[in-house]
Image (spheres, helix red, strand yellow):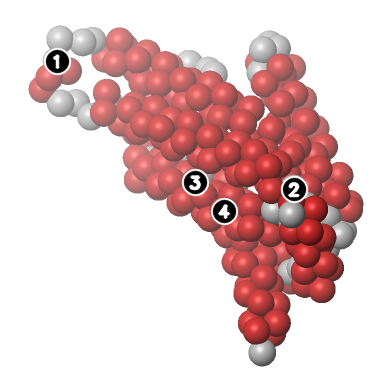
Amino acid sequence: MSEGIAEASTNLQARIAGSLYVIIIVGAVFAPFPVVPSGLMRGDAAVTATKMMASKSLYSLGGAAELVVYACDIGVALIFYELLKPVSRRLALLAAFFRLAYVSIAGANVLNHFAPLLFMSGGEYLTPFRPDQLRAVAVTFIRLHTIGFDIALVFFGLHCIVAGYLFFRSSFFPRILGVLLAVGGVGYLVNISANLLPPGIGAYLFPYILAPAGIAEISLALWLLLMGVNVQRWKEQAAAAKRESL
């Protein structure tokens, strides 16, 4: 009876993590792209500000989607720790730390997403500034949002590398998931270097650098959601880890 409950609990955690990951993937695709100024545009300040103000509701919804994504990331970090600690408790804790650090930085960075709306609101306290000055400040915050997210992705990339190693070393997940996730984590780290290149080159390389990460996270989400965990092997590895700790 207790073994059946434990098996159901472990697989339930895996499927919850898979469901949260699907939300993360959908939200991460939606948040930056509905309105161009959501952090990706480097062009004319007037054009950027005009597009943003023409779609204020959608732009705000993109910021809300970011917050939902980060809330789901917290759940995934905690569940991954529970699932992966039989492989190595310390490394599982390190992976959780990196993902939670990513959430902390990216969550605080959402302020930079909403700040342009404040400067473009037309409030009386903004009358000392000329319209072109307000547009320039708004676009500066948009770019700061991009930089802040890139910084957060460093920690997410480290999380993917450590978690990928744990998935690879586990006996209860396919090793290919771990390889893909670790390679994707390296891609997130390389992405920072690509952003230092001229905009045209960086934009060209962006899909190729992050494609492995997308494949890895989609594969992992679907596996967790549809297949779950090999509970028997999970229990065996957990028991072995417990014996080694004694």
Q: Residue at x 42, y 16 (%)?
A: 140
Q: Secondary structure at mark 1?
A: loop
Q: Quadrant of the N terminus?
A: bottom right
**Disc 2 target residue:** 88
Question: Does the rendering let one see residue 210?
Answer: no
**Disc 3 target residue:** 70
Task: Mark 4 vs mark 2: give the one in front.
Answer: 2
Q: Earlier in the sequence, mark 4 or mark 2?
A: 4
Q: Earlier in the sequence, mark 2 or mark 3?
A: 3
Task: Mark 3 vs mark 4: give the one in front.
Answer: 4
Dot 3 amino acid type: Tyr
**Disc 4 target residue:** 78
Q: Is residue 115 above or below residue 90?
A: above
Q: Residue at x 55, y 49 (%)?
A: 73
Q: Estimate the spatial distance between the alpha carbons at disc 1 and disc 4, rounded to whole Å.
A: 47 Å
Q: Secondary structure at mark 3?
A: helix
Q: Residue at x 74, y 54 (%)?
A: 246
Q: Nearer the viewer, residue 78 or 184?
A: 78
As drawn, is 187 to the left or to the right of 16?
A: right
Dot 2 amino acid type: Ser
Q: Estimate the spatial distance between the alpha carbons at disc 1 and disc 2, rounded to whole Å.
A: 58 Å
Q: Estimate the spatial distance between the alpha carbons at disc 3 and disc 4, rounded to whole Å.
A: 13 Å
Q: Secondary structure at mark 4?
A: helix
Q: Estimate the spatial distance between the alpha carbons at disc 2 and disc 3, rounded to whole Å.
A: 25 Å
**Disc 1 target residue:** 127
